[in-house]
Image (spheres, helix red, strand yellow):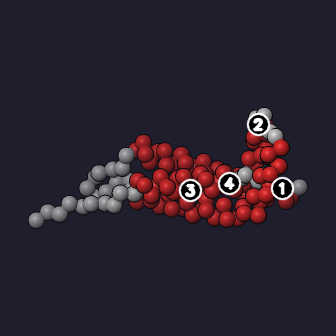
Amino acid sequence: MVTQYSKPNFGALRNLSSVGALFGGILASSCCILPLILGGIGLGGAWLGHLESLAPYQPYFLTLAAISIGGGLWVSRKSRCSPAGVCADSRSNKRAMIGLGLGAFFAVGTVAFNIFYALF
């Protein structure tokens, strides 16, 4: 009797971690980098000053981004191909990796901004 190898579907978990990484990265940068970017492209206003009230929550947002990025990379690695040769949908995996990359960009940018801001 031959049994088929069935791999769990990680698609929803991969998408959730991608959204979590992107959401955490944008929220982490909301007190420092996001107002700078929005003001630079002309979307300024009095409401930008209120984003600084999110600064005490920045470590929590960075933790959310780091956990989501790590989980997303782990799930993406696990769901690539099964031993039977069946591979995951490459478009879905590519979208998830773009979301993880953007979340990582915002999170690393926030940490780098805070380090360089403290030096000057």
- The residue pinned by badge 3 equals 20
Between 35 and 99, the one nearer to me in the picture: 35
Marks 4 and 1 sit apart, C-alpha to C-alpha, by 18 Å
N-terminal label among 4 and 1? 4
Q: Whole-percent x and y of residue 44?
A: 80, 39
Amino acid under label 1? Answer: Tyr
Amino acid under label 3? Answer: Gly
Residue 43 is tagged as 2
Of tags 1 and 3, the one toward the viewer is: 3
Between 58 and 120, the one nearer to me in the picture: 58
Q: Residue reaching furthest top? A: 42
User: Badge 4: few (under 14), some or many (20 or more) residues near its Cα, within 10 Å?
Assistant: many
Q: Residue reaching furthest left? A: 1
Q: Is residue 12 left or right of residue 115?
A: left
Residue 117 is tagged as 1
Marks 3 and 2 sit apart, C-alpha to C-alpha, by 25 Å
User: Badge 2: few (under 14), some or many (20 or more) residues near its Cα, within 10 Å?
Assistant: few
